[in-house]
């Protein structure tokens, strides 16, 4: 395992200290997690940029485009498929809440 030394300002150090003390984990745990998360985000950003550059460099005949309305519809379907709870909420919103039947009182 490699060792990395870096300088951080006092405020950042205090915040990492606070996390470590409150959670019972080490400062190294949080620093490693933050670095891993940042690397993953930066990798995704670089891949996105490369894909855009590749698309822009391709000839117009090779550039496949999708109409915006189709994209919105497909994203909506994906959202509903991944969140079934939202489907039932939307149904209630469209039809309105059902009226409660009066219950019998037992005296």
Image (tube, rainbow, N blue to C red):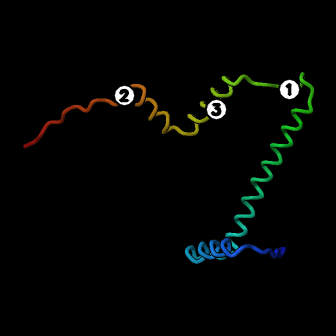
Circle 1 residue = 63
Give the mark nearest the N terminus, 2 or 3: 3
> Which residue does the image show at 86% across and 26% down from the upper left?
63
Task: Find numbered disc 2 in the image and state the secondary structure of the residue it sits on.
Answer: loop
Residue 85 appears at what percent x and percent y?
Answer: 48, 39
Give the mark nearest the N terminus, 1 or 3: 1
> Which residue does the image show at 74% across and 62% down from the upper left?
36
Circle 2 residue = 96
Q: Are marks 1 and 3 in contact (CB under 8 Å)?
A: no
The image quarter in which residue 59 lies = top right
- Where 86 sits versus 70, above or below? below
Task: Find numbered disc 3 in the image and state the secondary structure of the residue it sits on.
Answer: helix
- Where 71 sits versus 22, above or below? above
Tell me the tag on residue 45: none
| 76 displayed left or right of 104 | right
The image quarter in which residue 15 lies = bottom right
| 104 displayed left or right of 55 | left
Circle 3 residue = 75
Residue 30 appears at what percent x and percent y?
Answer: 67, 69
> Which residue does the image show at 73% across and 68% down from the upper left?
32
> Which residue does the image show at 45% across and 34% down from the upper left?
88
Give the mark nearest the N terminus, 1 or 2: 1
């Amino acid at each position: 395992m490699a060792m990395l030394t870096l300088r951080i300002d006092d405020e950042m150090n205090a915040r990492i200290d606070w996390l470590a003390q409150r959670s019972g984990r080490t400062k190294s745990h949080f620093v490693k997690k933050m670095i891993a998360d940042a690397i993953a985000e930066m990798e995704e950003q670089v891949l996105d940029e490369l894909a855009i550059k590749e698309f822009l460099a391709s000839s117009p005949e090779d550039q496949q485009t999708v109409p915006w309305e189709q994209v919105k519809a497909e994203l909506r379907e994906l959202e509903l498929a991944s969140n079934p709870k939202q489907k039932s909420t939307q149904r209630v919103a469209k039809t309105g809440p059902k009226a409660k039947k009066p219950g019998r009182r037992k005296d």
